[in-house]
Image (cartoon, helix red, strand yellow):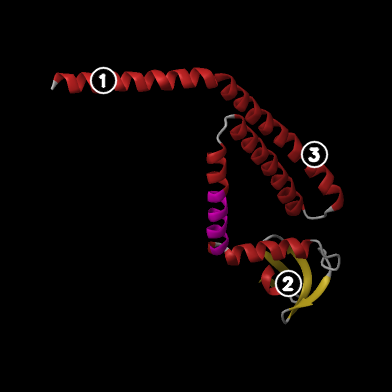
Amino acid sequence: MESTIGKAFTELIEKLEGWLSAIIQNIPNLILAIVVMFTAYFVARYTRKFVLKLVQKRVNQKSIANIIAKISAVAVVAAGLFLALGILNLSKMLTSLLAGAGVAGLAIGLALQGTLSNTFAGVVISFRKRIQLGNWVETNGFSGEVVDVNLKEFVLKQADNNLVIIPNKMIL
């Protein structure tokens, strides 16, 4: 009885020593990966600000400029994450992470189909030159002055001062 407990304890100690030596051998890679992630985070912050300034000069809608800036920042952080995982020799985890992101993206896309269609329609409408704030438009049986165009809806002010809110996907 005691020999099996002693054998199990010895195996446990050997396993823990192996893990400790593996951790000690990988400390430089871990430190480098952490530095890469912090660098990616700060580069993403400055990239977001830089892209926001560039896009605001060309696009009238603030919401569109913010979306483009945030997407650029997320891309920089994602690149930093993939680089850090590569430094740590976690290619299997990287493959699993990409596969999981694909499956999660598919599930989220299906679940938010209506919301995403309004959002993408809002982006497309925001880039149309004929649809500007203050213009008189006629769409979907309503006519009026464009009061607001955001990522979710299109707001018209009719001649009798009634506000009409139309989902973007109905207009596009």
Above or below, 65 relative to 155: above
> For residue 97, which quarter of the picture?
top right
**Where are the magenta residues, as a range?**
99-110
Residue, disc 3 = 50
Q: Main secondary structure of the magenta part?
A: helix
Above or below, 8 relative to 54: above
Single out the mark in the foreground, 2 or 1: 1
- Image location (x, y in percent) of residue 35: 64, 25
Mark linked to residue 9? 1
- Image location (x, y in percent) of residue 136: 83, 72
Neighbour tally class for label 3: few under 14, some 14-19, many 20 plus, Cα within 10 Å: few
Residue at 74% over, 71% down: 157
Q: Nearer the viewer, residue 118 or 111?
A: 111
Residue type pointed to by label 3? Phe
User: First in sequence: mark 2 or mark 1?
Assistant: 1
Q: Secondary structure at mark 1?
A: helix
Residue at 55% over, 50% down: 99
> For residue 144, which quarter of the picture?
bottom right
